Image (spheres, rainbow, N blue to C red):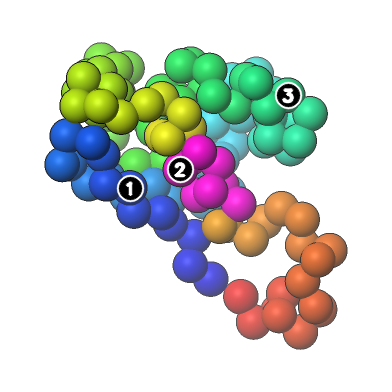
Amino acid sequence: MQNDKTVKLADGKTIRICFTIKTLRQLEKALGTSIIALYSVNTDRAFAIDTIVNGLKAGTDDVISDDDAFNLLQSHCDAGGSLEEVGASIMEAVLATGLFDRRKKPKADRKAG
């Protein structure tokens, strides 16, 4: 199962976003809501700055602080990027885990990956 998303930021930096059950729990705990509620019911919140910052903190390989995440986002936006782009990449990385909406996959595919 490939569960990561490589994102090229507007300032030329590349980040890798990857979630596991453990890091998704960290994200849920930081946001005070479930991943399912975040992306299926309350999509405006999915693109809130707090959600994006906590998504970066939970989903990147390196341990980063709030300030590191804010600086990364500011640099991206200063170079012409948008918060929505990063938020969408975080959402794609969450979905790439294959942990959600498994009912759409045939049973044999679920066992393979």
| Tag 2 near tag 3, CB within 8 Å | no
Quick one: label 1 or label 3, which is nearer the N terminus?
Answer: 1
Q: Secondary structure at mark 3?
A: loop
Tag 2: residue type? Ser
- From which residue to which does the magenta span run? 88-95
Q: Residues within 10 Å of mark 1 (few under 14, many from 20)?
A: some
Tag 1: residue type? Val
Q: Residue at x 71, y 80 (%)?
A: 109
Say if 68 sits above or below 105 in the image. above
Which mark identifies residue 89?
2
Q: Residue at x 39, y 47 (%)?
A: 17
Q: Locate residue 87, reporting x and y percent.
A: 48, 32
Q: Residues within 10 Å of mark 3 (few under 14, many from 20)?
A: few
User: Of residues 22 and 84, which is closer to you in this image?
Assistant: 84
User: Of residues 45 and 19, which is closer to you in this image?
Assistant: 45
Residue underneath mark 3: 42
Q: Is residue 66 left or right of residue 26?
A: left
Distance from Cα at disc 2 to Cα at disc 3: 17 Å
Residue underneath mark 1: 7
Q: Is residue 18 left or right of residue 65?
A: right
Residue 65 visible in image:
no
Please identify the residue farthest to the front as the structure is shown: 80
